[in-house]
Amino acid sequence: MVSSSVSVPRLVVAAPSSGSGKTTVATGLMAAFAARGLAVSPHKVGPDYIDPGYHALATGRVGRNLDAYMCGPASVGPLFAHGARGCDLAVVEGVMGMFDGAAGEGELASTAHVAKLLRAPVVLVVDASSQSRSVAALVHGFVSWDPEVRVGGVILNKVASDRHEALLREAMESAGVPVLGVLRRTAQVDTPSRHLGLVPVAERRAAALDAVAAMGAQVADGCDLDAVMSLARSAGVLSCAAWDAAGALGEPSGPGATGRGDRPVVALAGGPAFTFSYAEHAELLTAAGAEVVTFDPLRDEGLPDGSAGLVVGGGFPEMYAAELSANEPLRKAVAELALSGAPIAAECAGLLYLCRELDGQPMCGVLDASARMSGRLTLGYRDAVAVSDSALAAAGTRMRGHEFHRTVVEPGAGTVPAWGLRSPQRRVEGFVQGGVHASYLHTHWAAEPGVARRFVERCRTP
């Protein structure tokens, strides 16, 4: 732990609803302030993996998630401080509407909840495309709903004309909330979407760089950056110590982390097909004594030399099924690693990759299951308990996670399931087989750091 208080200037970008322009404004603010030479720390409320990729392009720093459901409210401040260490400004992009959180859990994990935990002022992004004077009533409602949330300013998005802007500003004077910026409706930024949101940066890096630059220029041109920075400086002092991977494990980092000098190699899948991974996972594995080596299943025909374990997170293997299938040498290497009993942790996309087939294309064949795209979206937080001992967790370990997919795996659980889920209905899910732990559930290991230590120990003695 590095310090007991955090005073970095910070703000939270929120909106009345999804689709209002939070990502454009948050990423644009990050890019605009980075262009001024500031060290900007990027953050995202909730479990989303995709937006942090754009944030990272805008700032040159790792985009980090702040999820009060998966990691618990007490972790939000320390994880924020971990990412914001040494920065001049932190920008936190919210999720959904400002007061929308985990279903049935009140304010838990909402943008408003995180803003209160961070003692941070809020910039409210309002889609003004179909209103004029009514915008004041809308903003008044969001300002007054929870007095503990401080809305310090508004950015009006999708404004049609000078006349429209004048009407909006006149209305906002009666609301008593400063207008920090106005973005015109005609200024569109190329950020294509598909079935699970924006297309990840890793799949369109050159175009994404152009898009982020355009967001930065748009925000710099339409917003009063000095006023935004002044608001960020008004954030209260946050009393907490910064999260640290070694500290979370209760031991020093490096080769001696577990009392052993050997550092087993843990292969971490990356590249365009496997873009979903929280940075803290690799940090925890490293602190637990592993050497984490990233590889790309689309291009690399073998696992990293000496791989003693494998972590395959989320992503979009369904978009690359033919290419993944064509890489037969790597598929065989993964199957051989699994057959040896080495620990393998696979989440969502990783689960699909370990199946016998995906949309008719041969995959690794580690699991006797098939996967296919479907027309149904599975989305939501989950409360889970480990059904049996595995390389990742001891039986009875409780973790909270998130499901987000349009694929179906048949069967949905193995003879030994990975998790028992309590919501939205009770069911078992996933596979524990030898050293393999495969599941649709995305988890955040900062909530239960011991899983990283357990995994690395299994890499030493599978």
Image: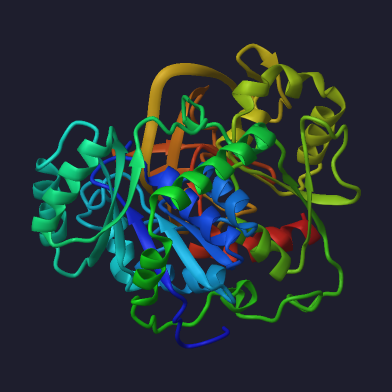
Q: Quadrant of the N terminus?
A: bottom right
The quadrant of the image that shows the C terminus is: bottom right
**Residue drawn 20% across the image and 44% down it:** 166
Q: How is the image coloured?
A: rainbow
Residue at x 79% of width, y 35% of height: 334
User: Which residue is farthest top?
Assistant: 360
Does residue 200 lie above or below 388 as drawn? above
Q: Vertically, is 262 above or below 403? A: below
User: For this rendering, which residue is in front, 169 or 452?
Assistant: 169
For the image, the number of numbered tags is 0
Residue lying at the far right of the rendered structure: 305
- Residue 227, percent from left and from top: 36, 66
Q: Which residue is the extreme one toward the bottom?
A: 4
Is 169 left, or right, of 375 in this rendering? left
Q: Is residue 367 shown to the viewer in this render?
A: no
Whether residue 164 is visible, yes or no, is: yes
Among the 4 quarters of the image, the one containing residue 282:
bottom right
Horizontal side of residue 256 vs 443, given as left or right: right
Residue 365 placement (x, y as % from top left): 71, 25
The residue at the point 43 percent across, 74 percent down is 9
Q: Quadrant of residue 183?
A: top left
At 58% from the left and 52% from the top, the residue drawn is 58
Q: Position of residue 130 (x, y in %)?
A: 19, 31
Report the side of 101 relative to 67 (left or right): left
- Across and down, in percent, residue 333 comes to 84, 34
The residue closer to the viewer here, 391 or 63, is 63
